[in-house]
Image (cartoon, rainbow, N blue to C red):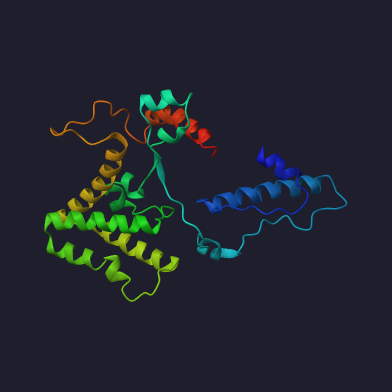
Amino acid sequence: MWERILVLTRCPFLALSATIGNFDEFHGWLQRVQDMVKAHEQADHRELPRASYKVHQVPDGVNVKSIKRYSDLQKYVFQPGTAEDREAWSTTAPDGYRKGLLALHPCARLTVQKLATTGFPGDLSFVPRESAELWRAMKKVVNKMGVEELVARVEKLDPDVHFRSTPYITQTLAREYEADVKAEIQSWAQSDDKQKCEACRKVLRLLHRNLDVEVHGKPDKDGKEPANKGPEMGTLAYMKEHLLDFVTMLQAEKR
């Protein structure tokens, strides 16, 4: 469908995207379409060919990948309501129903093996709050483990220390801090030191566990999971079970 629209488009057009990760692949696809248009029009000996069939990058060249996102994207996971909440949909406003969208930390779905082999995905960016949340998880874990080297390294990343001489925090400074925190925990995963690897594993588990508790509830005093825990968050079964709930909530809130 898109290729047909582009073939029929006679005027110059501008393609905008704030989230595309495979820029080179997308640019190549657009250029192939224009090359196909050029070959077709030349074969028809059109009297008024297009001035150019080249798909330009803005800005041109390799600098296109240096464009910084102006606004950050916060990640969320839907927290389903109870059976009583769903029953109330048909008769009442959704205010009492909505448990909300819970903030999803990007590290909650990473593994030590992933960080050790390929590191953080290039398109997995944090909002400033997520950088601070990762640091707090690291601090909690290393203080409990009592590894002096890691405690000292994490203390240097304390936001109050890191930004002590900064009158205000710009997006560039926040990005630099994000890179420092990521580099630190990634170095743990890639280390041959078993304590560092274990610390990384516990941090990732803590971030995942915090979210899992918010969605499914806390275990009982004996450590048993809630009886109505349901499918694992992020799985296809979870999406199938709660997709209708999520759409209904958005519709009720006129989103």
Quarter of the image for the N terminus: give it.
Answer: top right
Residue 164 appears in which quarter of the rendering?
Answer: bottom left
Q: Residue furthest front?
A: 92
Q: Please, is residue 157 above or below residue 227 in the view?
A: below
Q: On the rendered structure, is 213 left or right of 67? A: left
Q: Position of residue 25 (x, y in %)?
A: 55, 50
Q: Is residue 82 visible?
A: yes
37 or 225: nearer the viewer: 225
Query: Where in the figure is residue 222, as x and y percent of width and height?
Result: 12, 32
Q: Is residue 20 above or below residue 244?
A: below
Q: Residue at x 35, y 65 (%)?
A: 177
Give left or right: position of 128 versus 93.
left
Q: In the image, residue 90 lies at what x, y percent?
A: 48, 23
**Residue at 42% from the left image edge and 23% from the top image edge:** 87
- In the image, is 222 to the left or to the right of 210? left
Q: Residue 168: x percent and y percent?
A: 40, 71
Residue 76 lies left or right of residue 110; in this view the side is right
Q: Residue furthest right?
A: 47
Q: Is residue 190 visible?
A: no
- 71 or 66: nearer the viewer: 71
Q: Quadrant of the C terminus?
A: top right
Give me the residue at 35% from left, 48% from top. 105
